[in-house]
Amino acid sequence: MSGDREGAAGRTILVWCPDWPVVAAEIVDGVEASGPVVVLHGNRVVACSEAARLDGVRRGLRRREAQSRCPQLVVVEHDPARDARAFEPVVAAVEEVAVGVEVVRPGTCALAARGPSRYFGGEEAAAERIVERIAEACAVESQVGIADGVFAAGLAARDGLVVGPGETPRFLAGVTIEALERPELADLLTRLGVRTLGDFAALPAADVITRFGFDGALAHRLAAGLDDRPLSVRRPPPDLDVSETYDEPLERVDVAAFAGRVLAERLHEKLAAHGLACTRLGIEAVTADGQELHRVWRHDGTLTAAAIAERVRWQLDGWLTGARRGAPARPTAGLVRLRLIPDGVLVHLGLQPGLWGDAGAERERAHRALSRVQGLLGPEAVVTPAAGGGRSADDQVRLVPWGDERVPDRPSAPHTDPIPDFVLTPVQALTPESRLAPVIQLHSRRDPDASAPAEYPADAPGRLTFLSSRRTPPPPLAEEPVAGKGKPARRAQAWPPWPGRLPRPQPAVVLPRPLGAVVLDDAGSPVGVSARLELTAAPAALVVERGRPVGIVGWTGPWPVDERWWAPGESRRRARFQMTLADGRALLVSLAGGHWAVEAVYD
């Protein structure tokens, strides 16, 4: 008896949002939840809307069976991250009524009933207040169940019941064994004649653990109205923002800077009280005319009180003097409200300087100088490159403001060669003395025999060549697969990232605007590329814009690519070449729509 008292569950309020995966799909993806909708995982239905249930759709059905029962069914893939993101506002609404909320799973949360019931004058009054608050804040339907323990409260929430204290075992006794949500155990117990939770709870605990193991023992405790653990409540995030409102508008930089320093010290003290440090700071200001100004400052280390005050002064100086490039003149009125928001925080001792002093004084001085320029001219005045994925030189680098996270727009995994089963060595110039290994001239790349030496004219000592080991022919085009468009996606393990990507080395200079060019053959006629990716003639000279023809002594290509062919406004179909000229330059040249252009320059 004493063991039962120690394991007895406390009074619990459980909030349940019916069909939450469907509701989350409506909130995030705009799916009409009032219609017939199902959420699939592993080709089986894990949630369905009320309209789908009216047509006979149930959880556990296969996709084809569900669509046969309801032909107009809208199918949504299961996304736990989407469900969790959409459920966060609901949890926040519950925390406005009572603290100590535990998220059981997206769509369900629980909290102890003692505090809310005392504050609102009873458990039913607390349940009504929670449901009303969720409806007001999120416009989401919810039901509340109250019982002894999370498991019993969850079953009570299905019917919106309040099970009295001590009545939980009687309430569970008539519930079917399938409520345990353990299909294999429920099937076995049913075949043994145990069909309700009351029948299961009546079995001796020692016999249950001997026959069904540890998981069966946990299910036995739930059937008896005993929880396996207490509530693990979620601590709401602390409010770390600091703000101040001023009766007299701040129009002078020195006055505003002094006010900003006071706020900076308050913010630093507040963060220190929670053992935190700021790495990303948001500065907001409101003028007397209602104009709102906002800027975010980032820092690789932790911002001290002096560093926060310094960045506030820089930003206020830039706003009040109107010195930012491309920005309108200074605000039409003084500042009446300042607010500092720590957008990025970490544990104060969680950042360690680099081993070789990469967070030293010189780096800090450079950071301060560049941040000062940003405060005067705007964040885009100082930018740094961030390398990412892409097939061309112009889309592999993105410029980000100084201090921002250098995260590429398109991720890219390391790769060695742009074409599967085609190994390249560094490009080199071939001379008669170097013909010791089988080579293929770049202008005859389509030669299928890679084992025999290619013919090398003695009058072309500078022709570029590469060593190769070709096992399968390269694909004609590198196209991006599109999911759901009837085009099968290639296997990730068979293709390196960004198929069709230019081979290394990368160009040293990418031109902001490609230069128009013309490639000529020996007869002075323009060179083109056929639909079969064959050159109409061997390139002999290059004319850039209106310059003189320059001889081509080596070239490789074409490297074809057909990108985003499904988007008419974004599609690009090009053939790219790497060329070396007689004057020593090495260029990246492309042909698109019958027009040649110089895109980049190699060292």
Image (tube, helix red, strand yellow):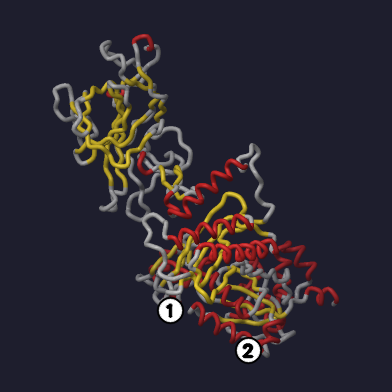
The residue under the point 57% across, 56% down is 310
The residue under the point 45% across, 42% down is 387
Q: Is residue 412 above or below residue 307?
A: above
Q: Is residue 69 above or below residue 453?
A: below
Determine which of the numbered discs, if any, sits on residue 125 in the image. 2
Name the front one of labels 1 and 2: 2
The residue under the point 43% across, 39% down is 496
- Locate residue 151: give its quadrant: bottom right
Q: Residue furthest right?
A: 2
Q: Estimate how packed mark 2 is, as few (under 14), some (14 to 19) or many (20 or more) residues with alpha carbons within 10 Å.
A: some
Front-most of residues 116 and 189: 116
Amino acid found under the numbered disc labelled 1: Leu
| Residue 137 shown left or right of residue 301 in the figure | left
* Residue 256, image x, y percentages: 53, 65
Q: Residue furthest bottom?
A: 121
Regarding residue 173, the answer to whether it shows in the image is: no
- Locate residue 353: give its quadrant: top right
Determine which of the numbered discs, if any, sits on residue 54 in the image. 1
* Residue 270, image x, y percentages: 66, 65
Regarding residue 108, the answer to whether it shows in the image is: yes
Report the label total. Answer: 2
Front-most of residues 282 and 519: 282
**Which image quarter holds the N terminus?**
bottom right
Asked which secondary structure carries label 2, the reply is helix
The residue under the point 60% across, 66% down is 263
* Residue 356, image x, y percentages: 64, 37
**Which image quarter holds the C terminus?**
top left
Inter-mark Cα distance, 1 to 2: 33 Å
Asked which secondary structure carries label 1, the reply is helix
Mark closer to the chain start, 1 or 2: 1
* Residue 182, image x, y percentages: 62, 67
